[in-house]
Image: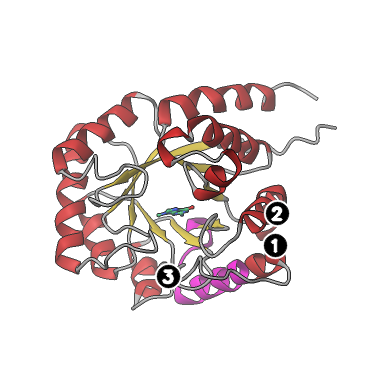
Amino acid sequence: MSRLNISANLQIMGVINTTPDSFSDGGQFDSLDKAFAQAQHMIAAGVDILDIGGESTRPSAEEVSEEEELQRTIPLIRAVREVSDVPISIDSNKSSVMRAAVRAGASMINSIWALRLEDSLQVAAQLDVPVCLMHMQGTPATMQDNPDYEDVVGEVMEFLSQRIEAALAAGVARHNIIIDPGFGFGKTLQHNLQLLKSLPEFRKLGAPVLVGMSRKGMIGAILDKPAHQRLYGSLSVAVMAAMLGADIIRVHDVAETADALAMVRALGQVAS
Ligand code: 9MG
């Protein structure tokens, strides 16, 4: 019997951040034209889902008004919809932005707050689209000050299990729930590595597992390299996550990740 855990539905989510201060894009894609070009590039490279966000999660990032977030994301969603039917996820924590994004053509919600803000649980239930519930300890502004757990894997699993229950109670369909351990969100390097190693455990919660480690500090801490030099580290952790059972891998470098995951898929298809 094979000990591999490769998902039969392994997918690549491409990060399209429209914030001028996005940590790894360095503001490169801060205009609609540049973000649209980036989306087209990802579509050509075979992306499965585009994740469009208008608010940075960097600790030092400024809060973005609803109006600004709508201006950054909605025209881009509409523009992508005109040229492609690739699934679009809206990375937002404001229920008004979620609603507007789905109206403009998005078909998934990415919630780093696991729908804990405003009336987002109810809105997600009404919109009836897949929703990613992510774990985060603290808030984006303070989460890396002193991440602290007695049992990081147990605590993150317990949190996600409670958020699944809350979503179900609010009327979110079980088949629409995706979970995410939230790499880098209130975690030290050791916490992140423990979570990665324990990824098969998360499948027991009965929902697809999304992971995002691309270009993150955990890679920088190991390689001692800045964000723009973390491609090989990002590909390595994408392959590890795929072999440990992740279903959706959120990345900046879609073409390169597509090649790496094609190799993983080929292994997954070998009869044991
Ligand atoms: C918006 N964002 C940044 N990092 C992320 C991650 O790891 N997972 C999800 N779901 N969203 C993220």
Q: Position of residue 71 (x, y in %)?
A: 14, 56
Specify the quadrant that holds the N terminus: top right
- Residue range in magenta is 159-177
The location of residue 112, given as percent across then percent down, is: 44, 62
Q: 21 or 38: nearer the eye? A: 21
For label 1, count other residues whose C-alpha is less than 10 Å away and answer few (under 14), some (14-19) or many (20+): many
Q: Residues within 10 Å of mark 3 (few under 14, many from 20)?
A: many
* Residue 170 shown in magenta: yes
Q: CA distance from mark 1 to mark 2?
A: 7 Å
Corner quadrant of residue 46: top left
Magenta stretch encompasses residue 231 = no
- Give coordinates of residue 146: x percent, y percent: 57, 70
Q: Earlier in the sequence, mark 1 or mark 3?
A: 3
Q: Are marks 1 and 3 in contact (CB under 8 Å)?
A: no
Q: Residues within 10 Å of mark 2 (few under 14, many from 20)?
A: some
Indicate the amino acid at tag 2: Gln
| CA distance for labels 1 and 3 | 21 Å
Precedes in sequence: disc 1 or disc 2:
1
| Of labels 1 and 2, the one closer to you | 2
In the rendered image, the residue lying farthest to the front is 224
Of residues 171 and 144, the one nearer the viewer is: 144
Q: Of helix, strand and loop, which one carries label 3? A: loop
Which amino acid lies under the numbered mark 1 shown in the image of this protein?
Val
Residue beneath disc 3: 115
Vertical placement of 93 versus 38: above or below? below
Q: Quadrant of the C terminus?
A: top right
- C-alpha distance separating marks 3 and 2: 25 Å
The residue indicated by pointer 1 is: 153
Q: Give the residue at mark 2.
A: 194
Mark before the other along the chain sequence, 3 or 2: 3
